Image: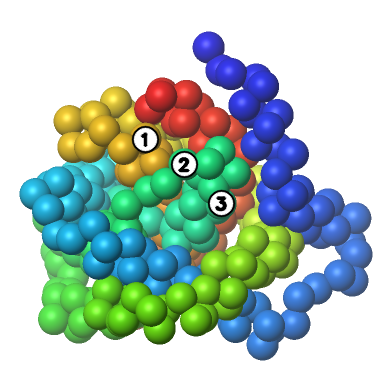
Amino acid sequence: MINFELLIFNLTNPTLLFFILGMLAKFFKSDLEVPAASKSFIALYLLFSIGFNGGTELAAAGVTGEIVKSLAFGFGLASIIPIYSFFILRTKLNSYDSGAIAASYGSVSAVTFVTAVAFLEMNHLKFGGEMVAVMASMEFPAIIMGLLMMSLFPSEKQEDKKERFDWKKTLRHSLTNGSVLMILGSLLIGFVSDSNQTAGIKHFTSDIFKGFLAIFLLDMGMVAASRIAAFKQQGYFILLFAILLPLFNGSLVAYLSHYITDNTGNRLIFAILAASASYIAVPAAMRMVAPKADPGIYIPMALGVTFPFNITIGMPIFFQLVQ
C-alpha cells in the first residue's frame, strides 16, 4: 500500500510546489517565465553543486568495493533497460522511435536526481558521493544500446538499407555532453580539492541549493505542461508506457539494490535513476545520429509524463520500498 502521509509530505515540499505552480501558470496561459540566461546558469549550478559535494563526500569515504559494485550495477541497468524497453515499444512503434525512447528510459534525468537529493535531505538521509558518478556513467551505455537496437532490429521499411551509425561520434558526444561533463568534472574537482578550502565555499555549494532548485522546477513545470498536449495524437500506449515502465523499473531496482548497498539513500537514488528518463542528453544525441526518430514522442514522454510522475508519486513509493 502507498504511504499517503509520505505522499502528502512530498507534495508539500516547497520546491515541488513551485513545479506545480509552473504547470498551473502554463495551463492558465500566464506570461510568467524564467529568463533563458538564468535557466542555463541555474542548471549549471545544480549540476556543479551535486557533482562537487559528491566528490568531497567520495574523497572522505574513499574508494571501496561497494563503490565499485555500485558503478557496475548502474552501468548494467543502463545497458539492460533499453533492451526490454525496445521490444515492448516495437509492438506499436517503428524501430527509430522505439530505439530513441528505449535509450531515454535507459538513461537518466539529472533534474530528477537533483530532486531526489532534495527529497533525501528533507527526510534527513545521506547518500554516498559515488551515486553522482553512477548517474553520470548511465548516460552513454543507454544511448549506445538504443542505437544498437535500431541497427539490429530495423523496421520492415528499413530492411533493405540498414542505418550505419557513427559509433565513435556517438560515444564522444555522449561523454562530452554538457550535463555529463559538468557533473563529472565537478565530481573530480571535489574529490581532489583540499577539505579546508572546500569549506570556504560551502555557502555557495550547499546553502543556496534548494532556492535555485525551486526556481528551476518552476520553469520545468511550465515546460512539462507545454509537452503534455503532444500525447493527444499518440494514444494511450505511450502514456501508459511512460508511467508503468518507470514504476516497474524503480520498484524492481528498489528491491534489487539491497544486494549492492545497505544505505537507504543510495538505494532510493538507484531506484529513481532506474525510473527516470533522459530529456536532455539522449535527445541531443538522437538529433545528431538518429534524426528519423521523432522527438515529438520521446521528449514529451520523458518530460511531460515520467518526470512529473517520478517527483510526485514515484519517489514516495520507492522510498517506502527501500525502507
Residue 37 shows up from this direction: yes
Q: Amino acid at mark 1?
A: Thr
In the picture, the disc for residue 118 is 3
Query: Is 165 located above or below residue 132 in the figure?
Result: below
- Residue lying furthest front in this view? 196
Q: Residue at x 24, y 29 (%)?
A: 258
User: Which is more N-terminal, label 1 or label 3?
Assistant: 3
Quadrant containing the C terminus in the rendered view: top left
Q: Mark 3 or 2, which is nearer the eye? A: 2
Is 311 on the left-hand or right-hand side of 158? right
**Observer-nearest residue: 309 or 188?**
188
- Density class for disc 3 (Cα within 10 Å; few <14, some 14-19, many ≥20) is some
Residues under labels 1 and 2: Cα distance?
8 Å
Where's residue 140, x and y in %? 24, 66
Q: Secondary structure at mark 3?
A: helix
Residue at the spot of label 2: 125
